[in-house]
Amino acid sequence: MQSQWNTLHPNKQKCIASYSGGKDSSLALYYALQQGQPISLMVMLEEQGLRSRSHAMPLEIIHAQAKAIGLPILKASATWANYETAFVDLLVQAKQLGAEVLVTGDIDLIAHAEWNQAVCNRSDLKLYMPLWQKPRLEIVHELIALGFECMIVTVNLNLGMSIADLGRILTLDYVEELLARNIDPCGEAGEFHTTVIDAPIFKRPLSVRKGDILYHENYAFLALELNHDDL
């Protein structure tokens, strides 16, 4: 099964893309747009329905990304307790809209991949993870080379990241700095999360301004707001 996770049937199958607004799901969508036919983004929200689950991105930013990409959004609010049920419900909706494949940006964490496969089995969808088992550093270099502009918006202060990292853009120099600090430049251990503000899959870049820094336990979040005057 693992050998099939990073391949997609060449007949432009219709896809639903699990989308956080971050670098990995955006690069996975880039591949899906080349090799398949994405029909919608799929976004999981916190229970209040105002921010994305995990990345805590405001819904306004997610909608702006979707508009820049040119795809609609299927979304659901969920607690961690009912997350899987809500996720599968969205997959079933996507199946009814014609989707055949779920696309995710997972790289090499087998527990995540197996969970993805399990929810696909429940909704009768195939699974496509185009980044699966690619070297992490290669992925970050590819993102930068392709022109993805990825801003650090969440940091785990217990895993080597600091407040000073918030708002920084992933560049080759910054990647070398992270490596020197013994931080995975993909952030796969939860060191940081990103928001993509420009990309080759965007019709135009997002114009954002940096807001307050919010704190929760060992995490710090940079609030982003859209510059509506530029829209």
Image (cartoon, rainbow, N blue to C red):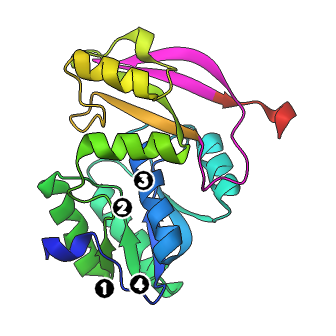
* Distance in Å between CA atoms under marks 2 and 3: 6 Å
Q: Marks 2 and 3: CB-CB under 8 Å?
A: yes
Residue 222 is inside the magenta segment: yes
Q: Say which label, 1 or 4, has the lower sequence index.
A: 4
Q: Is residue 47 visible?
A: no
Q: Residue furthest bottom?
A: 11
Circle 3 — which element? helix
- Looking at the image, can residue 219 be seen? yes
Residue type pointed to by label 3: Ser
Tell me whether the residue at label 1 lies in contact with that at label 3, contact meaning CB atoms closer than 8 angstroms. no
Q: Residues within 10 Å of mark 1 (few under 14, many from 20)?
A: some
> What's the distance in space between the residues labelled 3 and 4, CA to CA?
18 Å
The label shown at residue 223 is none
Q: Which residue is mark 4?
A: 100
Residue picked out by circle 1:
124
Mark 1 vs mark 2, CA separation in Å: 16 Å
- Snapshot quadrant of residue 11: bottom left
Q: Is residue 149 above or below residue 47?
A: above
Q: Earlier in the sequence, mark 1 or mark 2?
A: 2
Q: In the image shown, does 183 or 41 lie closer to the viewer?
A: 183
Q: What's the magenta region?
A: 198-224
Residue position for label 3: 25
Question: In percent of the image, x 42 and y 38: which residue is there?
Answer: 55
Q: Amino acid at mark 4?
A: Glu
